[in-house]
Every structure is written in C-alpha cells, then in structure tokens.
Image: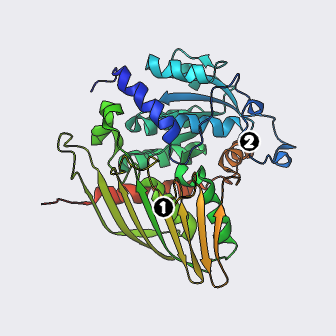
Amino acid sequence: MDHQNKNKRRDFLKNTLTAATGITVFPLHQGINSSMINDNEVSLPYLHRHLAPEVRFGVIGLNHGHIYGQTNAIIRNGGKLVSVYAKEEDLLDQFVQRYPGVNQARSEEEILEDSTIQLILSAGIPIDRAPLGIKVMQHDKDYMVDKPGIITLQQLEEVRKVQAQTRKIYSIMYSERLENRATVKAGELVQSGAIGKVVQTIGLGPHRIRLSTRPSWFYEKKYFGGIICDIGSHQFDQFLYFTGFTSAKIISSQTGNVHYPQYPEFEDFGDVTLQGNKGAGYIRVDWFTPDGLDSWGDGRLTVLGTEGYIEIRKNVDIGGRAGGNHLFLVNNKDTIYINCEEIELPYGRQLIYDVVNRTETAMSQEHCFLATELALRAQAQATNLKLD
C-alpha cells in the first residue's frame, strides 16, 4: 500500500475538513487556546469552577480531516494542545499551519511518555486506531478517537480488557450525533417526552465518494473494516442513544460493491435491521451522494415515538432551507420546524469534565463499546448484495 501519495492525501484532507460528518471546521487562527475560537457556543464556566483550568492533550495520527473537529472540540472547551505527531509530512505541515503553536514531536513515544499530557486524540488509518488506543491507556492517558475507533471483534476484546485494567477513557467520537446540533436538540426533545416512548430509529448515512481524492487505504477493507463498521458506526450510536437500549441483536445485514468493480475490496452500500430490548432500528449507508447535491451527504435521522416523531436533516434541506441542522417535530399538539444552528455542542466540554473528574457524562464506556460491537457484528454477518 502506498502511504506517500501526497497529492491524494492533501486533496482528501482539504475536502474532509469542510465535509466532516457533523463537524464544524474553523479557519486558520493565531494560537491554540479556547479564546481564539469563536463558534457562537454558550460557555458554561460553572462546570469548571473547582476544576483544573485546562486539560493538556496531544494528537497522534492525521489521516482523516475529522481530526480538526476533534481538536477544536477540546480547544474550545478549555483544552491546551501540546504536541502532535504524524508520519506523513504533508499532513503534519497542514496541521501545524492551522495550529502554529503546537510542538512537533519526533515520535509517538515522545507524546505517550509526556507525563503532563492527559488526553490523546487520533484520526489515524482505522486499522491503527485501536492498537494506539491500547498504548495510550497503558501510558495512563485517556483517548478520544475518530470513528471507526475499532475495526475487528478481536481488537474490541483487547481494548475492553485494557480499559478495564487501566480505567482510562476510550471515547469514540461518533460525530453525526456528538457534533451535530440538530441531533443534540433531538436528544433533548426525546428526553423531555416530546414524542412519547421511542419505538424505532431510522438512520440514513449517504456519503459522496470523490474518487480522485481518496488515499489508497480507503479502498482496502482490511484497513477500514467495511462500510457498516466505518460510516455505519454513527448510526448504531444513535440507535442506542435515542432508544436507551442496553442490549440489541442484528436481525439482518448486507453489504455490497455494486458500482466500483475497479476496487474489489471496497463496499459502497450497506444496510442493517436490528432489534433491541426497547424497540427496533434500521440503518442504511452508502457512497452514492450525487454531485448535484450541495453537501457531502443528505444525512437523515427519524425517531419514531408513541406520541409523535422527529426527523433530522443534518447537512442539507433539499426543500430549500439554507444550511444544515434542520429538525422537524410532529406530535399530538403541533408540527414544528426548529433551526438548530445555535444549539450548544456539549461533547468536548463533557469529555474534559470526565477526564478531570473520572466520570462518564460525555458517553458511558459501555455505550461506546456496545455501539462498536453492534457495528462489527453486523459487518461480520452481512450477506453480499449483488445486482444483475
């Protein structure tokens, strides 16, 4: 596999910075402190009155543009970016241009062995993310990783084992929920009882493929785990979160490569039907977003309840409303549209709180692992979709 295709990496990162799933990417700024990032979010200083003023963090692995959303989520909530390491010089140069005060470490070990660093972020090649997370936890640090944070059941078993031994945080940033304002608002509405008891979630995650910009590992299943494991993992997180399920089983799943025979290990379509102890779910993911859409993907989430339903248009409203973060609520009283552009994104703040206080306010560890396990099991048992 060729890791040195700099032009493809550069184009890939350039596109994914602005097309990162549910993630806001900020322009170049002169520094790396929270005061330098203005995203119109509501600050909640009372949460930090009796805490350390900041969490020091490092970054290892820059192979997906999601790393910029991950980094900004921590910086804007008081984190201090200390060091970064990447093998690829072009990716490292781009990151340092965006965060010019960051130390460029000479190796992973330099960051792992820095006792002043509490948290490590990564968006490396997916196959490398779990092994790095294990090393991070064994070095007495917490870990926040881009999805898919784990790509095999064997990796999951080892990560669970080390996490139980170390009691460190292994947090996978499922950005379609955690960094999407409309989805955050939907969670508030569901918890308030706005649609009654949740019966089913339907999560649709289409993506634009942009063939010429993708690095070679993107097309090789052993490096990313498969389409359900990869972009489908967001949907399992949402399924568990909105239903409150503590157990679930895969009823059926299928994957296929129906349009890109030149990449035989690639998968461009996947769907899953699942059932939990509190309801049902359906998931569909694909790489078929047409070029005529003014977004990388028309991501949608429908949450059906006994007293109504919510539909989220995460990135675009093809009906004509500008921007993303559109929420529609229908219940026994009203039909309501809510523009969610001003909703706070709490994940970064909550994760910092958890790092300092050893709590689970951002996401429980069991939820994180169960969402991944469901995605991995659905991927493993998927039948092959073939079109005539």
Q: Quadrant of residue 141?
A: top right
Q: Residue furthest top?
A: 106
Which residue is at the far front?
320
- Report whether 204 appears left or right of 98: left
Q: CA distance from mark 1 to mark 2?
A: 34 Å
Near mark 1 (Cα within 10 A), the count class, few <14, some 14-19 or many ≥20, is many
Element marked by disc 1: strand
Q: Is residue 63 above or below residue 158?
A: above
Looking at the picture, how far across and down is residue 27, in whole percent?
Answer: 62, 30
Disc marking residue 356: 2
> Residue 300, which numbered label?
1
Q: Give the number of the disc on residue 279.
A: none
Q: Is residue 144 visible?
A: yes
Q: In the displayed structure, does residue 162 sit left or right of residue 343? A: left
Please state, as top left, top right, bottom left or bottom right, where the N terminus lies in the image. top left
Disc 2 residue type (three-letter) = Val
> Of callouts 1 and 2, which one flags the residue occurring earlier in the amino acid sequence?
1
| Amino acid bearing label 1 | Arg
- Secondary structure beneath disc 2? helix
